[in-house]
Amino acid sequence: MGLILDTNALSAVADGEPTAVAAFSSATRIDIPVIVLGEYRFGIAWSRHRSEYERWLGEMLSASRVLEVSEETTRHYAAIRIELKRAGTPIPSNDVWIAALSRQHALPVLSRDGHFDLIKGLRRRSW
């Protein structure tokens, strides 16, 4: 089964966190939302281990697919935002984009963020 990585999952795998690596390794394919890629690159820009993380990220990207936001993604994004607003359970905007890509591609999200569980039809895996 394929997986979409949230930023906390990408970071945990980069840091070699054993249970995150195990969940990651069980996937047949890894997809990284362009949103996650931006968040991760922002984070490593501040790291004193920037060169190591950038090298690791390059290797990760060569073995993964980056999911771009498309017009179809925007339809999922709008539907999710409406559902969350009606339920009174907003979540961070970047996570709505990640959820929209998860719905669009019918793939679970690997994340520690429980607010993904508020989104109907979205499957979240944790570690």
Image (cartoon, rainbow, N blue to C red):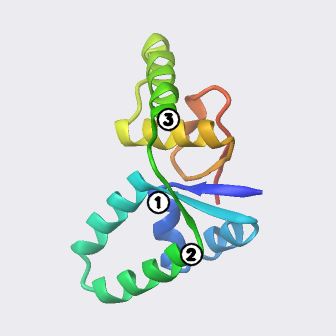
| Mark 1 vs mark 2, CA separation in Å | 11 Å
The secondary structure type at the circle numbered 2 is loop
Q: Which of marks 1 and 2 is in front?
A: 1
Q: Nearer the viewer, mark 3 or mark 2?
A: 3
Q: Do the residues labelled 1 and 2 touch (CB within 8 Å)?
A: no
Residue depicted at x 41% and y 32%: 91
- Residue named by callout 1: 8
Question: Quick one: which residue is furthest to the left in this view?
Answer: 46
- Residue named by callout 2: 17
Q: Position of residue 100 (x, y in %)?
A: 52, 36
| Mark 3 vs mark 1, CA separation in Å | 22 Å
Image quadrant for the C terminus?
A: bottom right
Nearer to us in this view, 5 or 77: 77
Going by the numbered disc 2, the residue's amino acid type is Glu
Residue depicted at x 36% and y 64%: 40
- Residue named by callout 3: 73
First of labels 3, 2 by sequence position: 2
Numbered circle sitting on residue 80: none
Task: Categorize mark 2 by other alpha carbons within 10 Å: few (<14), some (14-19), many (20+).
Answer: few
Q: Is residue 106 above or below residue 88?
A: below
Going by the numbered disc 1, the residue's amino acid type is Asn
Q: Do the residues labelled 3 and 2 touch (CB within 8 Å)?
A: no
First of labels 3, 1 by sequence position: 1
Q: Position of residue 28 (x, y in %)?
A: 76, 65
Going by the numbered disc 3, the residue's amino acid type is Thr
- The answer to whether residue 103 is left or right of residue 90 is right
The secondary structure type at the circle numbered 1 is helix
Q: Where is residue 60 in the image (x, y as percent from the top left)?
A: 52, 76
